[in-house]
Amino acid sequence: MEDSVGNNGVSANNVAQAIHTALDWASTPDARLNAVAFLDSIKRGDVRALANTSFLLVKKNWSSEIRLHAYKMLQHLVRLRWEELSPAEHKNFANLSLELMSEIADPCENWSLKSQTAALVAEVVRREDIGLWQEMLPSLISLSNKGPIEAELVAMMLRWLPEDITVHNEDLEGDRRRLLLRGLTQSLSEIFPLLYNLLERHFTAAMNEAGRNQMDIAKQHAATVTAALNAVNAYAEWAPLSDLAEHGIIHGCGVLLSAPDFRLHASEFFKLVSPRRRPIETSVPKFDQAMSNIFQTLMNVSREFLYRSGSSPGSIDEGEYEFAEYICESMVSLGSFNLQSIAGDSSLLPLYLEQMLGFFQHFKFAIHFQSLQFWLVLMRDLMSKPKNSTHSAADSSAVSSTGSGEVENAKKKTLSFVSDDFCGAILDTSFPRMLKREKVLHETAITLGALELWSEDFECKGTFSLYRSRLLELIRFVSSYKPLIAATKISEKIDTVIKGFLLSPAPTQDLAVMESMQLAIEGVVNAVFDGSNDFTKTNAEVQFALFRTFEGILQRLISLNWTEPALVEVLVHYLDAMGPFLKYFPDAVGSVISKLFELLTSLPTIIKDTSVHSARHARLQICTSFIRIAKAADKSILPHMKGIADTMACLQRDGCLLQGEHNLLGEAFLVMASSSGIEQQQEVLKWLLEPLSHQWTQSEWQEKYLSGPQGLVQLCSEAPVMWSIFHTLTFFERALKRSGFKKANWNSENSSTPNSTPINPMASHISWMVTPLLKLLRCIHSLWSPSISQALPGEVRAAMVMIDSEKSSLLGEGNSKLPKGSLTVTDGSKVDINKEGYAEPNGSDIRNWFKGIRDSGYNVLGLSTTIGDSFFKYLDVHSVSVALMENIPSMEFRHIRQLVHSTLIPLVKNCPLDMWEIWLEKILHPLFIHAQQALSCSWSSLLQDGRAKVPDILSILSGSDLKVEVMEETILRDLTREICSLLSVIASPPLNNGIPSLEQSGHVSRLDTLKSLDTVASCSMVGFLLKHEGLAIPTLRLCLEAFTWTDGESVTKISSYCSVLVVLAIVTNHAELVEYVSRDLFTSVIQGLTLESNAITSADLVAICREIFVYLCDRHPAPRQVLMSLPNITPHDLVAFEESLKKTSSPKEQKQHMRSLLQLATGNKLKALAAQKSVNIITNVSMRQRSSANAPESKVDDGDVVGLAAIM
């Protein structure tokens, strides 16, 4: 191959100059572009000239940059153009590559050049068959014996050899990869002895030379050891474990764990082999033996570390702690995936568990954090039911070949080693680690000693909430397994915390410890008394001990006389946590209720100083606690309902209970009533709602405040009335949510007619609740009307702008932190309800009130529709339509989205079939007309000008242009998705009974029985919309336009509506519908496939295309015309496509034919169908997780070209 090298001298100089220019940033951009183009032409040109020139340029007389690029050119040739060389040239090329390894074995050579030389030889070996490797192996062994540098090069080559197995390479086909894997597997008997020899010989030499102070030579040997370890790690993920053990690799890497210079690389090997899955073949005993050896190797290292760090932690530096973290990570993998390998060893298993406990208890957070995952996996698996057992931590040693009985025996055996002391130690370690370092006072931190708590400074450890949730899950598992131990430990810890807290010089500033333990006790109590643990079957003696322990905890809590609002809140949370205990210990319920009322009355009711809002917030938390305890205590609280009611009445009479607090206590009553049957529920609702109905239905306040916008403006200046309306409405919402039936509580005993259908207890209240609400919502909606908004007072106009938390949410920044007085009402919205006692509301108060009324009002209407007749038959549809739709043209997009989501979707879902004619057109017609026009305008603006024009922009007072643009686009996408969701609901199967499934129908002949559109409209809501022109036209336009908008989620939702349209066109053969589907919809769906954003729903879109063509091409010429308008299709292609469809009735195969045709006809320009590179999975290779960058969104180019060719 070098015969013509001399003739290529000029060419080599030219290539060298081009490489220099391309890499030199001092070159002009044009010069760099020209140089790159020239180099590409060389790579694409004559393959022999490329080889000869590249071999010239790797010589030492060229600069490192040029040589490195020449190596890349050689590798390119081998990978992509190897077949163009003859067999003789292949052999010559391989010999020249091997010679380069000898030439570059120089201490002065650049490491990257050595690596690329080794990579080139590996590339050649991969491209040839196993015969070349067999020929080359003696030369490689001989080369490795020459010296440490040559040995390092051989190790590098061995490291590069399996690269295409462990790292996916899209240029290497699956078959070639499998052949490479097979060839390498057959060669492991030669590769592993060579690697072991390199490790042993050069490690010994490095130690000897270092002992003689020959540091330069020692470094060369050390580099060879490192290269050999890197090579070993390239095989660790996929090579049979038995081979690694048989040839001494596991032993060799284990020895190097004790060598400070090599231990991190050696630990990487164990990190890779530890999670290896147990094989199913007959090699299980060899695998288990190898894994057992790995266990013992790592346990020896762990034992030494744990002893040293326990006895003299000062002697261990950060490097050793980092190494210990790696060892711990491997130990976790061993226990999580391969504990079955030592499950039968009664001496090794307990020692392993003891060491993992030592890691869990370690004061270094990073080491503790690693071990947490093991204990979580172990306890989850050990505590799982037999049918849920998995092949993880606790699987038996024969899990692959035996039944579940042996698995359960192995679990029981493993569980027997998790003793009381183990569980106690886990809990003792977990409790203090519930704290976050940033929240602990300096004085408290001192008492913790060297213990490292979670901190924001820790990298790659996730969030504190995620860590704490894992810790709590472990606490629950341990508590479920050893309830008495958990009860004792939590009792001792709470006793210690309370005593320390009472002695604290600044208790209100040192709440972190108390707050953290509240979560711990909640976890323990839930685990011990939760229904899944079946407490009633617990041993009577254990039950008595548990009762006594938790009763002691409860008495200590009740005895605390705290009056500071912050302390009261913490105490209330502790009482909440005891709720499940109260279910089994009803005698304690009375004392808890008394304590809650005592705490409530200890805090002031009227708070004029805004700096002490915490007292008000604490009162609300106390009232909320009644709800939580009512849920948890279940029927244990029923005997106390009358006492609670009497106390409520007394507090209300004395003016010590505000309306918002009364609402929360009322909700608690509804929870209690739900446990006692329908009659009790109705009585409670009547008791709670009758006083409200007298106020809510009075005509005086409605005429004064709800007769028009000016009345509402006046209302906004009268805080007591304003907040009274808000609390009344939110209680309606709570009552509707709590009035559902519990299946267990509804039976024949609750009804005078055994087979009668239960009536919702809220049914009789809907009419009087909703009528004033509609007036209220109509007034609020009218404020956004331009003619009215201009005349509003400044404070009301200020209240109509977007709040900061909404802006943050739109920007994807999460909810901004709300003031402490803000509570989450039942629908999840946050409203500041601390203003109940104020006389002068400001703009912020009015804004919160508007938001609260809108949130709860829409929810009340939506929930009311679920009750059926009480809403649809007894309410005036005109009043509902006017209230919701009269001002929809002036409503902001975010408000329309909320209205659709909370009210209109439930209304559509629950509207009785015989009410469609009365309700749907009046409600949906104005919505669809406005939505289609508004969305079309805003999307056109976004796609053409890059800026979505939404009415909400007037609500955004400030912010950078970029942020405003982001918020606008988010608002637009949210409304688009909600409207598409509404159409998806309309197309849902429950609302479209009787429509056949094309997937089940198969051949067209099965759909020859046609129905009229009138017939279909009586059982299909989509058919009903099509029958009414006012509903049909805007929705059909929306369907077409949605496919041009770059929002895949919206297309996913609307595609189900389009599918039903296709079915109706087929079933009814309605001329206009068939024309629309065959031409307009077919064209739009194909256009939708040009957008990459629709890749997620491409399968559905192809299915629609297939249905349109298969079922309608013989009824209408449009489907064929649409396909023939595509830029790259020929008549022959269409004929071949139709022939393929006729040969199969399988929908799946027909979809594949349609997909292939669309790709062919568009020249592969349908980005949603862009072929994904298939990942070839090799069963004995562990796949690594890799992040992939999201592909950028494609833009739509609306040019002047007409037809489908315009979108290609």
Image (cartoon, rainbow, N blue to C red):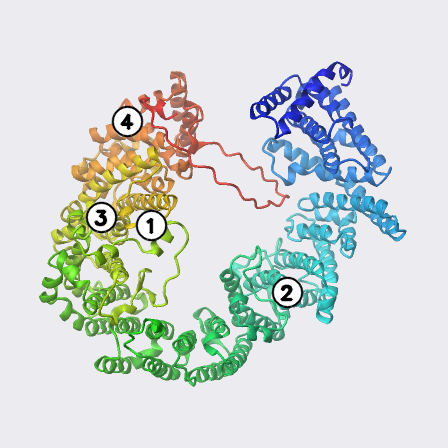
For marks 2 and 1, give the one nearer the viewer.
1
Q: Residue at x 27, y 52 (%)?
A: 898
Q: CA distance from mark 3 to mark 1?
A: 20 Å
Q: Secondary structure at mark 3?
A: loop
Quadrant including the N terminus: top right
For marks 3 and 1, give the one nearer the viewer.
1
- Residue 615 percent coordinates (x, y): 35, 75
Amino acid type of the residue that numbered disc 3 sits on in the rendered structure: Met
For marks 4 and 3, give the one nearer the viewer.
3
Amino acid type of the residue that numbered disc 1 sits on in the rendered structure: Ser
Residue linked to disc 2: 364
Asked whether, in this view, residue 133 is left or right of residue 426, the answer is right
* Front residue (pair 1142, 606): 606
Residue linked to disc 3: 891
Residue linked to disc 1: 958
Amino acid type of the residue that numbered disc 2 sits on in the rendered structure: Lys
**Which class describes the residues within 10 Å of circle 4: few (<14), some (14-19), or many (20+)?**
some
Nearest to N terminus: mark 4 or mark 3 = 3
Q: Secondary structure at mark 2?
A: loop
* Front residue (pair 494, 532): 494
Asked whether, in this view, residue 664 is left or right of residue 566, the answer is left
